[in-house]
Image (spheres, rainbow, N blue to C red):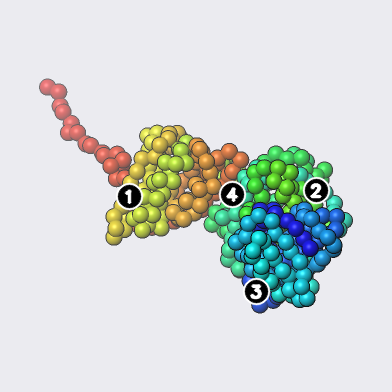
Amino acid sequence: MITIQQDTLKSALNSVTRASLKNSLAALSLVRLDARSNGTLYLSCFNGETAARAITYAACDEDMSVSVDAVTLKDVVETLVSEIHLSVDQNSLVIQSTTNRTTLRIVDEVFPMIGDESISPIATITGTTFRSIFRILPFASTDSTRASLQVLHLTLDQENILAQAADGYTAACVKEGIEGPSEQISVSLPLSISRLLSTLVDEGDIMHIGTSGESRYIFHIKNTANEKDLTLATVTSAENFPSEQITNLITNARNSETAQLNVQQSSLLQSIRMVNAMDSQSAFIKTVNGATKIASAETETGQARNILEGTASGANTNIWLSTAFLKRAVEACKGELLIRIADGKNPMLIEAGSLTAIIMPLLVDGQKDPFPEDEAIAITLPEISMA
C-alpha cells in the first residue's frame, strides 16, 4: 500500500500528466506509478514525443508498479482531501480517502520511460531565465510546410543563451546570461516540448540541461521549496533553423534606421486594441516632428487614430504593419519599448530589455495617410514690386 498526502500527489500528477494525451493509443494516455519500499514514488507519462517523470515521496509497504489512465487518476485525486491510500486489488488500482473508494482498471501497456540514463551535463539555468526565453514562443511558425521554423532554437555558450523563433513574417530573440558549456551548442527544440516546458517551469525553479545521446536532450526541473522534481526527455529537431540569417536581418534593421521611437508598452497595446476595434488587419505608425502616431486602416466601422505616449527622434517616416504581428511583439515586452524604423519597405525592430523582435512591413498600395493634417501646405505669395 502507498500512503501519501493529497496535495503532494496532486502536485506531482499535475506536472507529469501534461505529457500525456487522450489518444486511441493506450500508451499515450497512461501514467505509470512505480513505488519503492524506500519511500520514493515515480510517476511517468509519454505523449509520443516526450517522456516525463516526476519524483515524490510516500510511505510504501512494498514495491509496486501499475499503469492507469492519467487524466482519470488526476481527476479523481482532485476530488479527494487529506491522506490517500493506493493499493492493488487483482487488476485494479484502489484509491481510498476517508470514506471514498475508487477503483481504476490497470492497463498492461509498455511505453518509453526515463530511467537511469548516463547524462552529460550542458548548462544550469534559472527558472527566471527560462520564463524570459518562453516569451518568444508565439513567434514560432505553426505552418506544417515550414518544419525548420516549427522550433524554439537555442544557442548556448560559456556566458549566454540565445533563443530564437521565427515564422517568415516575424522573428524574435532573447539573450540571457548563464554559466554554459565550454563549447557552443545549438539545439532546435520542437514546439511540443517547448510549450510543455513553458507550462512546467516556474521562476523559482532550477533547470539542468543535459544530453543522453545524439539529439536526445534531458531537462531536469528542481525546486527544493516545493519539492518539485521533474524530468523530461525529448528528441530534438534535425531541420536547419536559419539562425544566422535572422541575426543578420536584425543587424541590418538596426543599422538602417532613420527614426527611433521610445514608447510605453501599455500605451502602444491600448492603441492596438483601438485599431482592432475598427476590424482592421493593418496598423499605420508614423513619426512626425518628435511625436509618434498610430492609426487603423479606414474600414466600414470607422478609423482609429491615436498619439502614443513617448518620443521620436530622427527623420519623419511611416510604416504599415500587420496588427496581429504588432500585437504579438508588443505583448512579449514590458515597460518602455525602443522601436527602430527605416522606412515603409524595410522591417521594423522592437527592443525591450533582453528581447528583440522584427516585423516585416505591409506593402500597401493606394492607402491614404490617416494623418493628412501633418502634410506641409505649400503657400505661394504674390510678388510685390517696390516703387
Q: Position of residue 283 (x, y in %)?
A: 40, 51
- Give the residue displayed 79% in from the left and 55% down from the top: 59
CA gap, disc 1 to disc 2? 50 Å
CA gap, disc 4 to disc 2? 22 Å
SS at badge 3 = loop
Q: Earlier along the polypeptide chain: callout 3 or callout 1?
A: 3
Kind of residue at disc 4: Arg
- Is residue 148 visible in this depiction of the protein? no
Total numbered circles? 4
Identify whether 387 is placed above or below 67: above
Crowding at mark 1 (Cα within 10 Å: few <14, some 14-19, many 20+): many
Kind of residue at disc 1: Ala
Kind of residue at disc 2: Ile
In this rendering, position of residue 381 left or right of residue 145: left
Residue tagged 4: 135
Residue tagged 2: 122
Q: Nearer the viewer, mark 3 or mark 4?
A: 3
Q: Earlier along the polypeptide chain: callout 4 or callout 2?
A: 2
CA gap, disc 3 to disc 1? 47 Å
Q: Earlier along the polypeptide chain: callout 1 or callout 2?
A: 2
Q: Nearer the viewer, mark 1 or mark 2?
A: 2
Q: Earlier along the polypeptide chain: callout 1 or callout 4?
A: 4
Residue tagged 1: 304
Extreme-front residue of the structure: 99
Residue tagged 3: 23
Identify whether 375 is placed above or below 72: above
Q: Earlier along the polypeptide chain: callout 3 or callout 4?
A: 3
